Amino acid sequence: MFNQSKLLLLSLVLFSSSGCSISINVNKKLSPPADTKWVNIEVRNSSQYTKPFPLEVRYISYECKKKRISGFDGSVITEPSYNVIGIPMQQVSGDTWKAKVAKTGGGSCKWTLSAVNLGIEYIDAIHLGKGLVPGTAVGVALAFDNDASRNGKYRSVQGDLKLSPKYYPYITE
């Protein structure tokens, strides 16, 4: 009898808490239209010990909204959906890597480009010392709309953007 009560109570808790999440299946399939504009990403990687990591590309849709319940007051909040995909960088010559990103992702949700993260990571640290293991990658985030740049840490650029930062290893013991 006691085990049945536990099971009934557990079932009741699980059943009642399942209503806290509002889920709508969003079609995340991209199909850029033929006339879409493209963003060409090029990374020059002059070190044999590093390589560009795959682009993290975020698209946003104002057509296919998602709903969530506010933890503050329990109200239902409707907001845009996001679609994050990885795009591998392709090595086109010794130290040059490239990728193309569609500005309009299309599809039934009318995905549009919101942000791109790119950068490099160490693949081998042997040249820096014995027994060292590569750590985290370094990179840059590019915002393509007001949603991605809402934290105010971006500057506006028109046309081509050329970044040429120098990265130095940081060794911790």
Image: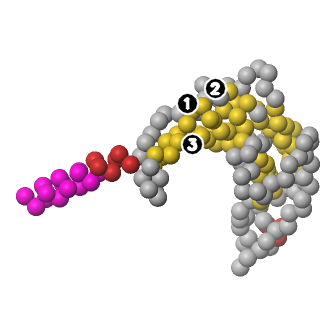
Q: Pointer 3: residues within 10 angstroms few (<14), some, or many (20+)?
A: some
The three-letter code of the residue at mark 3 reads Glu
Q: Pointer 1: residues within 10 angstroms few (<14), some, or many (20+)?
A: few
Outermost residue, left side: 1
Q: Based on the picture, tell me whether residue 13 belongs to the magenta stretch.
A: yes
- As drawn, the label of residue 79 is 3
- As drawn, the label of residue 64 is none
Q: Pick whichever of labels 2 and 3 is earlier in the sequence.
A: 3
- As drawn, the label of residue 27 is 1
Main SS, magenta residues: helix
Camera sees residue 69: yes
Residue 133 location in percent, x, y? 71, 67
Q: Pick whichever of labels 2 and 1 is earlier in the sequence.
A: 1
Q: Pick whichever of labels 1 and 3 is earlier in the sequence.
A: 1
The Cα–Cα distance between marks 2 and 1, rounded to whole angstroms, is 8 Å
Camera sees residue 95: no
Query: Measuring 59% from the left and 40% from the top, which residue is drawn there?
Result: 80
User: Where 129 falls versus 69 (above or below)?
Assistant: below
Foreground pick, 4 / 126: 4
Quadrant assignment for the C terminus = bottom right
113 sits left or right of 27 in the view: right
What residue range appears in magenta? 1-14
User: Where 17 falls versus 130 (above or below)?
Assistant: above
Q: Are marks 2 and 1 in contact (CB under 8 Å)?
A: yes
